[in-house]
Image (cartoon, helix red, strand yellow):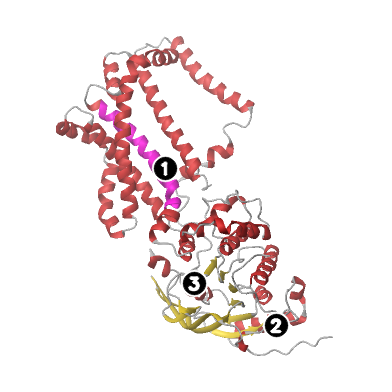
Amino acid sequence: MASELRETIPAFNQAEASGGDEVSLTNWSALTNQGFAKNWGEVGLIALVAVILVGGAEIAVRAFNIQSYIFPPPSTIITTLVTRFPDLFWPHMQITLIELLSGYFIGAAIGLILAAIITQLPLVEKIITPYILLLVTTPMIALVPLLILIFGFTLTPRIIAVALAAGPMVMINAATGFRRTDLAKIALARSYGASTFQIFTKIRFPLALPMIIVGLMVGAIFGMLTAVGAEMVGGKNGLGNQLMFWSSMVKMQNFYAIILLLALMGVSIYVIFYWIGKKWAGWQA
Amino acid sequence: MIESSATRRVETANGARPLAADGARPIAMSVRHASKHYKTETGSVHALEDLSIEVPRGEFVCILGPSGCGKSTLLWGMSGLHDLTAGEVIVNGTAVKGPRPEIGMIFQDANLLPWRNLWQNIQFPFEIKKIDPKPYESRIHALLDEVGLAGFEKKMPRELSGGMQQRASIVRCLSYDPDLILMDEPFGALDAFTRDEMNLLIQKIWMETGKTIIFVTHNVSEAIFLADRVVVLTPRPGRLAHIFPIDLPRPRTIDMTFTPAYIHVVKEIKNTIETGRYTPLARAVQG
């Protein structure tokens, strides 16, 4: 760190922060600046389009007499989800949530710590990067049969798969964040006598935070995909398993209800991280 | 008036102060035979060559030169942020080996932290230095009042104009009351009107607090307006071309910058920068 600052000609007044603006997702103000809806006219229009889409599907399914094993009417799917949620879906959603949350927290924690360490140690980064790339690009679901062989039909192989899917995603994004260096800000902290640790906590970490939040979001979404995929491979519970079960039973209203449930979970992940980003990284607008 | 631990300046009857040469005041900073080479990917950049200056306590010195003359390098060497390749910097009697608590630095642009609001930005030096800001709070409020930022404490940097940001960074620097202030082209990015405003503000703060200020700029008029002495450097490598004592009375006004005497100094300094050495120019006949 010290040499990076000490051997650089002080002429960095143009660039606010090198390596910024690389991901549009970090522009947390995008939605809010525009506002969710400007007035009741817009709210009405947005609602109208939604009604036409869902209602249109409902009418089309009934009008063309599409068989319910291909696509049940939207009203049936929603009714099934609402009425059967407590007994049919919630027990399995709990399993999926447990896998997702425990795998995600393990993976994200390891990913974050690794990102913070390797970006400070260029040699370690060079050594580790190929393996991280391998983990990012290999679909972790492919490892599940092997993991089941080792750990049996328990939650363990699924949790490991989620951790392996989420961790590298968090890591590469967080590492991109930590690599952003703003020498002017570091010089500012140094001029007050800041230690390397203080520069990390007070400058590098806040500077990296928008990318870290993006990484945490992408990691959570990949974690969910992997959890559902792993459940489809084997075992007796979880939403993925139930997808396979109800489609084999040709009970398509249950199948679609689970799809809807998974979509809602995915949107919730996005919304949660959107608010976190707006609160903690809203300065980057 | 802003209270300050620094000794109040000695003023003569007309407001002008004795120059460094009389040796009456202790030396706040001295630079001895400073040289600096940067190692870059394309080779070595020779930024500074055997430069020596002494700055007495309470003096306002401007370091002036064209882009790439090593003036920022000199300032960063003075602050302890950069190591010099050769030579040494002495502050208050001891050699500078790294950042020093009695030195405050003001950077190009305002260099506010964009994730902190104005008040949190001013708290930043206290957090790093692990000093309780409580005893300084009335001082900070007085400073914010002085620079016209009272009531903007909760604003984020991006909500402030360039001039306001730079004023905030001046408050941040003065908040913990350093004796010696190093300013690295602080107003370079501001428009001419805001720059005039900032120069008047800096002069006022300096006259009230008696700080030693070393101010790097590439603007000749700004340097003359602010300085007791203007140190002119040659282009790369930066060498001392000449030191111009400026004996205009204080407080200086923007109107003074249009007087023949002022313009004469501007011409002499510009000539020195172009030729690399000082040659006295004939004064225009004054009617």
Provide the residue designation for mark 3. Answer: B79
What secondary structure do most residues of the magenta stretch adopt? helix
Along the viewing direction, whichever of B76 and B205 lies nearer the viewer: B205
Highlighted magenta segment, given as a residue range: A205-231
Q: Name the side, left or right, on which B116 lies relative to A167.
A: right
Mark 3 element type: helix
Mark 3 vs 1: CB contact within 8 A = no
> In the rendered image, which quarter is residue A146 located in?
top left
Q: Compared with residue B252, is residue B132 higher up or lower down, i.e. above or below? A: above
Query: Percent x, y for residue B240?
Result: 54, 84
User: In the image, what residue type sits under mark 1?
Assistant: Val
Provide the residue designation for mark 2. Answer: B247
Chain ID, mark 1: A
Chain ID, mark 2: B
Residue furthest out toward the front = B135
User: In the image, what residue type sits under mark 3?
Assistant: Ser
Numbered tag placed on residue A214 in the rendering? 1
Q: Is residue A222 magenta?
A: yes
What's the distance in space between the residues labelled 3 and 1, CA to CA?
A: 37 Å
Mark 2 vs 1: CB contact within 8 A = no
Query: Percent x, y for residue B282?
Result: 73, 90
Q: Residues within 10 Å of mark 3 (few under 14, many from 20)?
A: many
User: In the image, what residue type sits under mark 2?
Assistant: Asp
Numbered disc total: 3
Which sits earlier in the primary sequence, circle 2 or circle 3? 3
What's the distance in space between the residues labelled 2 and 3, CA to CA?
A: 27 Å
Quadrant in which the N terminus of chain A is drawn: bottom left
Nearest-to-viewer mark from 3 and 1: 3
